[in-house]
Image: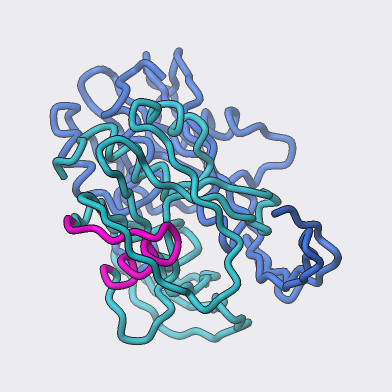
Chain colours: A cyan, B blue
Amino acid sequence: MGFERTGGRQVWEGRIAAVRVDRFRYDDGSESEREIVAHPGAVAVVAHDGEHLYLVAQPREPVGEQALVELPAGKLDEEGESPLETAKRELAEEIGKGAREWRHLTTCFASPGFSDEEFHVYLATDLYDETADSGEEERIEVRTVRLSELDRAIRDCRDSKTLIGLLWLRAYGDRS
Amino acid sequence: MGFERTGGRQVWEGRIAAVRVDRFRYDDGSESEREIVAHPGAVAVVAHDGEHLYLVAQPREPVGEQALVELPAGKLDEEGESPLETAKRELAEEIGKGAREWRHLTTCFASPGFSDEEFHVYLATDLYDETADSGEEERIEVRTVRLSELDRAIRDCRDSKTLIGLLWLRAYGDRS
């Protein structure tokens, strides 16, 4: 059933996210209000050199994890930068690599029942060394995982965008 | 690097989510504030009968989608109900099925950089008819997809928890 947005108000604005309460009218004439968390979106990169995957571990305060293992990733928070450009920048900043081959695997909503956040997930192969300084204080450690241990990495994974990327690699390999 | 939470305040509370700004101290003595969206968590169910997958389409106002296709799913919003119990209830309410076989596939964080929401993803097989009334106004349509069209369903998917479930099925089948 279709709907249209008929109004709304912002109820909180933070440094990264904001919260709106929007009003919608449906095709049957009914109406409802929805709480919506607005987020700029994020990229994540499955990067491997044919032998090793490159993951990162970092503190994730919202979920109380001291070192959550994830794909190299970052928010779309640079004005005018495309998702692919953000992915390239984050790969250099977080694991010190560039890639000659880039493929877009999927773009999906993180949690579409209450947030507009989108993930853009890429596969990066044919890697080379390329460092970049984020200019930010980053508490990130690179973790390499053998491709032969991909199944274990999937079992241990606790991050949704990372699971999507690793499962995609497990299901389809470098074909995308 | 480790951290501990040293304080915080709630800055907004809605019907489903709330926002806190928490303060953390790291092992090197530095401190920072984090905006955290608190959410009760959700379950999602990969349900198939050996020939067809059962998906649902519903309006998702936060992302402007009139009919987003997802796994049967729901929030952990019933006091005292376990994730598996919620999964069983949602499967009956949303697609009118019960299942004799249940497997837990994974539990992961939806977006751990800013939210504490967790997804619990299950595989449900050996299905039978079992209806339940949610008591809520639900704008949900059941969509069946042939298992032989799983790859296309994955390509078309725009929901992260659904991608995790479908890719898990594609990668591992009914082994989990």
- Pick out the residue farthest to the right: B6
| Residue ID at (38%, 50%) | B160
User: Residue A33: percent from the left, percent from the top?
Assistant: 52, 72
Q: Is residue A18 magenta?
A: no
Q: Is residue B5 left or right of residue B169?
A: right
Side (left or right) of B26 relative to A92: right
Position of residue A75 relative to residue A62, above or below, is: below
Q: Position of residue A69 (x, y in %)?
A: 53, 45
Residue B61 visible in the current orientation? no
Viewer-side residue, A11 vs A150: A150
For residue B156, above or below residue B28: above
Q: Which quadrant does the N terminus of chain B fall into?
A: bottom right
**Horizontally, is B34 left or right of B84 in the view?**
right
Q: Is residue A147 above or below residue A84?
A: above
Nearest to the observer: residue A126 or residue B167: A126
In the image, taking residue B31 as reference, residue A118 lies left or right, namely left
Q: Residue at 41% of width from left, 23% of height from top?
A: B124
Instruction: From this view, report whether residue A105 is shown above or below residue B35.
Output: above
Residue at x-position 52% and y-position 28%: B88
- Residue A84 image position (x, y, % from top left): 26, 68
Task: Compare residues A47 and B41 and report the one nearer the observer.
Answer: A47
Between A59 and B51, which is closer to the camera in this rendering?
A59
Secondary structure character of the magenta stretch overall: helix
The residue range painted magenta reads: A84-101
**Quarter-wise, where is residue A59 in the image?**
bottom right
Q: Position of residue A165 (x, y in %)?
A: 34, 45
Q: Is residue A31 visible?
A: yes
Magenta-drawn stretch contains A95? yes
Q: Quadrant of residue A106?
A: bottom left
Residue in the picture at 44% in, 47% down: A55
